[in-house]
Amino acid sequence: MQGSVNSIETFGLVDGPGIRTVVFLNGCNLRCKYCHNPEMWCMQKNNMTVDELVEKIIRNKPYFRRNNGGVTFSGGEPLLQIDFLIEVCKKLKEENIHIAVDTSGNGLGKYDELFKYVDLVLLDIKHVNQEGYKEITGGNINKSLEFINELNKTSIPVWIRQVVVPGIMDNNEYLNDLKQFIKTIKNVERIDFLPYHKLGSEKYDKLGIINPYKDMPEMDKQKCNLLYEKFTKLYNA
């Protein structure tokens, strides 16, 4: 079995605990207006077998052991290569490697099989209602809700990630709705606010893709931190 791997980042520090190898898988069925990896939208040719990818990841096992790290599968949307992902995770678990999956939950199913090998889910919240989700991603929130429903049947720890776009998520109404949405998700250990940035904007020009947020200002980091503090108090009240 082969998969379409875009890139592999070693010594990642922000995509799960410890030092991590981050594997970016091609393919995504959403078109998030703030996406900074549009080059991964389309599924590319398969370029790596299960054993080849496992071998590359295992090379970093000594660093994982010393720093309580592991591997994180990201993208794109890794759940679109679910069969490949399951087979890789199965072999990595035989090596006792910590496995995280960074996902919006917009996949193809077979989650119960995948969850046998996953130690952490990094869940990307795009929006909290159908209308807002459709506006930002072009997709249907029900796919993510189906994933969350399956995830709630497990005891897997969950880290929530919310990109904060100015004018959309930086208001009291959204913060209240976000609180209620996250409260429906079990085993949440951590919630992160990620300020919207334009670091990937040049990729749109290079790929000849219209950037829908070309004129959207970046989210001020200090304001984002204050929003997070406000949300934390609201969430824990």
Image (cartoon, helix red, strand yellow):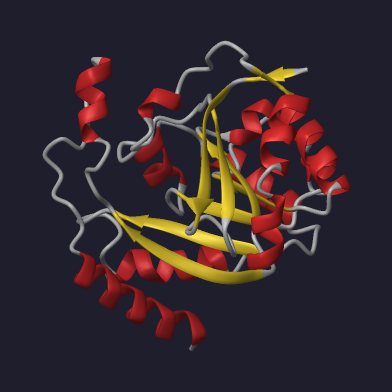
Query: In the orientation shown, which residue stands out farthest toward the right?
Result: 94
Please say whether residue 185 is visible from this viewpoint: no
Query: In the orientation shown, which residue stands out farthest toward the bottom?
Result: 237
**Quadrant assignment, res 56:** top right
Q: Residue at x 48, y 89 (%)?
A: 237
**Quadrant assignment, res 183:** bottom right
Number of on-image labels = 0
Q: Is residue 110 left or right of residue 80?
A: right
Q: Name the foreground residue: 59 vs 132.
A: 59
Q: Is residue 34 left or right of residue 90?
A: left
> Percent position (x, y) of residue 154?
80, 59
Q: Residue at x 80, y 57 (%)?
A: 153
Q: Is residue 237 left or right of residue 62?
A: left
Q: Is residue 114 left or right of residue 71?
A: right
Q: Name the foreground residue: 9 vs 157.
A: 9
Query: In the orientation shown, which residue stands out farthest toward the top?
Result: 45
Q: Name the foreground residue: 98 vs 29.
A: 98
**Quadrant assignment, res 157:** bottom right
> Percent position (x, y) of residue 192?
44, 66
Please say whether residue 94 is visible from this viewpoint: yes
> Percent position (x, y) of residue 72?
61, 47
Q: State the quadrant of the N terminus.
A: top right
Compared with 147, 173 (above or below) is below
Q: Residue at x 77, y 34 (%)?
A: 88
Q: Name the foreground residue: 34 vs 55.
A: 55
